[in-house]
């Protein structure tokens, strides 16, 4: 297959379900497909890059990948990150901070990530605790500051696709605020609290997203948002609970994106989510990330067969086994299988299932991206 | 129709108050704490665990049942201690070092208690030394380790290495669980068992001490 497309054309073609010249690849185009600091250090030294890291997601400790590395790897995507709010975030010590939602996190000694130490709305709360909570100001100018500049830079200096990140609609943040166990229990014993909290979070995020989309919605190629709904063996909550409590809110959020932008909507949701793909198509998801292939029901060939032309897929390179624990040969084989299973007729962007962790050998990272570029699939011969 | 049916249903449905009331009512009827645990709580958790394993219910339903069983055990455990009841066995459980994810571990912990085990829950971010100390102090038969992250799976290996050094390996049964774990991984690090979910873990713990 001759390389005849720009990076942007390649990506847009693929997610529009048309055959691109080669399968597009992503690294660092989103905060869920980047790399954790300690892994990035290895990558930097291989490419002879020096200088301080720019963190694009503090909790997950992932970086904005250096432009030189992205070019060397021939990556098709570039991220447009949401800005930091001017007010509401607070440093609480060297490895401790409070985010704009009032959630406090600390970086434990033996961990690669920040973990939560406060759940401000946990325990026995009432609806008025939710309505009286000190919610972030969605019109804080910090959120949209720099968006136009980032898009302009991508257009002026690259021919890559621009991926705009908007906040997680309502699941993640409500879990952080309520605490995971209480959040789950609310579905069964406190649905009123659950709905009030989901609505309060959704309202803030709808407004932040609206401001972002008004700023650059017409200029970007993809808009990404993330709310995890899957676990390893199935959904986190029952299908009925998803349909009743989450789907309508997600639909409202995605509709606003489509109303304010011609870009494709990329939805990141980890784990086994095969049972809700029809629903996600119905409410406006164009591209599904990350295709966690080790989770139940997330077989790439099966997904392609069922949803070809209707849902595009983004991800697929196994981060639970192959990347951290496989050999270079295993990684290349996984690339080939994915491209063969998902690449025909477009509808596929290859990336690691999630941020590349420090346990992934450098040679495996390079093999993944190099081989995705070199491998000529049978359908292209 | 069992006289424990109401209690089983209350636990299954996550009815905290109902569970405590029914436990008290059964005690007033002269049932022993042990009988109430076996006839009601064990049975309810068994039903919910099986449904979860079969994909018929999800984390919320598991959690509320586990929490309800806990409310029942809050009443029953002090009475059990008084009657000199012997637990089925002792399990030391925790999420391994570097990992702060404990929902799965908490569910297993509550279900083990419901199944009649004495459970020493060390919480999360638990290092090898702490596991070893607890196993020694508690004279436990089983070590149960959990993780969510691929990057903390290595802590399971380190803990098993520490068991070897402490002369506990082979004496204590080791079971692991968590999304990134596999049977192959369990074999590789020398664990005795890997549970796909809480139900499998509890069933295996029962077999270990039978």
Image (spheres, rainbow, N blue to C red):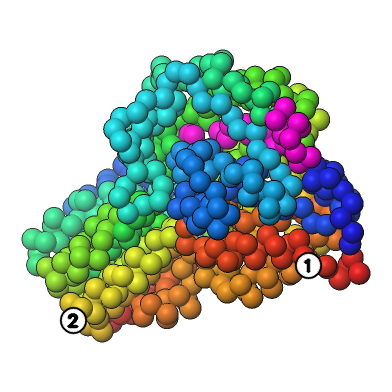
**Mark 1: few/some/many CA within 10 Å (<14, 14-19, 20+):** some
At mark 1, the secondary structure is loop
Secondary structure beneath disc 2?
loop
- The residue that disc 2 covers is B167
Identified at 78% across, 25% down, the residue is A218
Residue A49 or A361: which is nearer the viewer? A49
Query: Is residue B19 visible in this depiction of the protein?
Result: no
Question: Mark on residue A375?
Answer: 1
Residue at 34% x, 65% y is: B155
Disc number placed over residue A21 in the picture, else none: none
**At which x and y percent is residue A209?**
63, 25
Start-end of magenta stretch: A152-174
Q: Position of residue B49 (x, y in %)?
A: 44, 63
Residue placed at 19% from the left, 56% from the top? B76
Give the quadrant of the C terminus of chain B: bottom left
Q: Position of residue A110 (x, y in %)?
A: 32, 54
Q: Is residue A288 left or right of residue A51?
A: right
State which quadrant residue A186 falls in: top left
Magenta stretch containing residue A157, yes or no? yes
Q: Nearer the viewer, mark 1 or mark 2?
A: 1
Q: Does A235 lie within the magenta span?
A: no
Which chain letter goes with mark 2? B
Spatial CA distance of label 1 from label 2 is 51 Å
Question: At which x and y percent is residue A150?
Answer: 66, 29
Quadrant of residue A182 within the rendered picture? top left
Q: Is residue B128 left or right of residue B54?
A: left
Vertically, is B208 above or below A99?
below
Q: How many marks?
A: 2
- The answer to whether residue A142 of the structure is visible from this angle is yes
| Mark 2 crowd level (few <14, some 14–19, many ≥20, 10 Å Cα) | few
The N terminus of chain B: image quadrant: bottom left
- Name the residue located 64 percent from the left edge and 43 percent from the top edge: A67
């Amino acid at each position: 297959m001759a390389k005849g497309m720009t990076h942007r054309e390649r990506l847009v073609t693929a997610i529009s379900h048309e055959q691109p010249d080669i399968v597009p690849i992503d690294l660092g185009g989103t905060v869920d497909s980047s790399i954790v600091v300690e892994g990035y250090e290895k990558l930097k030294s291989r490419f002879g890059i020096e200088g301080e890291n720019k963190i694009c997601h503090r909790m997950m400790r992932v970086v904005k990948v250096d432009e030189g590395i992205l070019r060397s790897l021939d990556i098709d995507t570039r991220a447009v990150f949401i800005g930091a709010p001017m007010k509401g975030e607070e440093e609480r010590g060297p490895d401790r901070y409070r985010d704009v939602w009032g959630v406090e996190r600390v970086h434990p000694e033996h961990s690669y990530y920040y973990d939560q130490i406060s759940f401000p709305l946990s325990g026995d709360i009432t609806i008025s605790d939710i309505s009286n909570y000190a919610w972030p100001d969605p019109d804080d100018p910090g959120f949209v500051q720099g968006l136009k500049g980032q898009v302009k830079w991508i257009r002026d200096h690259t021919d890559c696709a621009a991926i705009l990140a908007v906040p997680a609609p309502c699941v993640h943040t409500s879990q952080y605020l309520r605490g995971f166990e209480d959040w789950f229990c609310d579905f069964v014993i406190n649905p009123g609290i659950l709905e009030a909290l989901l609505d309060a979070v959704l309202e803030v995020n709808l407004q932040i997203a609206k401001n972002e989309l008004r700023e650059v919605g017409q200029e970007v190629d993809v808009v990404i948002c993330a709310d995890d709904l899957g676990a390893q063996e199935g959904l986190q909550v029952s299908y009925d609970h998803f349909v009743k409590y989450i789907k309508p809110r997600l639909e409202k959020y995605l509709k606003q994106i489509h109303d304010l932008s011609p870009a494709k909507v990329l939805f990141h949701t980890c784990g086994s989510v095969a049972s809700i793909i029809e629903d996600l198509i119905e409410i406006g998801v164009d591209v599904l990330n990350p295709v966690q292939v080790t989770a139940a029901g997330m077989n790439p060939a099966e997904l392609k067969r069922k949803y070809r032309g209707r849902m595009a897929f983004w991800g697929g390179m196994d981060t639970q086994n192959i990347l951290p624990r496989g050999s270079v040969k295993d990684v290349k084989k996984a690339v080939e299988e994915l491209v063969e299973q998902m690449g025909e007729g477009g509808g596929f962007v290859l990336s690691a299932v999630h941020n590349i962790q420090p346990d992934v050998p450098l040679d495996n990272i390079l093999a993944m991206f190099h081989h995705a570029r070199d491998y000529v699939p049978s359908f292209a011969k | 129709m069992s006289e424990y049916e109401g209690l089983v249903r209350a636990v299954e449905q996550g009815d905290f108050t109902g569970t405590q009331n029914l436990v008290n009512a059964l005690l007033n009827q002269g049932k022993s704490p042990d009988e109430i645990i076996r006839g009601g709580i064990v049975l309810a958790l068994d039903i919910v665990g099986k449904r979860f394993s079969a994909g018929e219910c999800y984390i919320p339903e598991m959690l509320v049942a586990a929490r309800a069983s806990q409310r029942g055990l809050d009443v029953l455990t002090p009475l059990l201690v008084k009657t000199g009841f012997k637990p089925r066995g002792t399990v030391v459980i925790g999420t391994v070092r570097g990992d702060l994810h404990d929902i799965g571990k908490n569910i297993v912990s509550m279900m083990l208690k419901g199944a009649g085990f004495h459970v020493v829950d060390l919480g999360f971010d638990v290092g090898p030394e702490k596991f070893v100390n607890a196993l020694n102090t508690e004279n436990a038969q089983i070590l149960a380790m959990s993780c969510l992250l691929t990057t903390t799976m290595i802590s399971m290996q380190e803990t098993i290495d520490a068991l070897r050094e402490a002369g506990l390996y082979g004496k204590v049964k080791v079971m692991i669980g968590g999304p990134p774990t596999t049977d192959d991984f369990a074999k590789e690090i020398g664990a005795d068992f890997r549970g796909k979910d809480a139900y499998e873990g509890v069933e295996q713990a029962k077999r270990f001490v039978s």
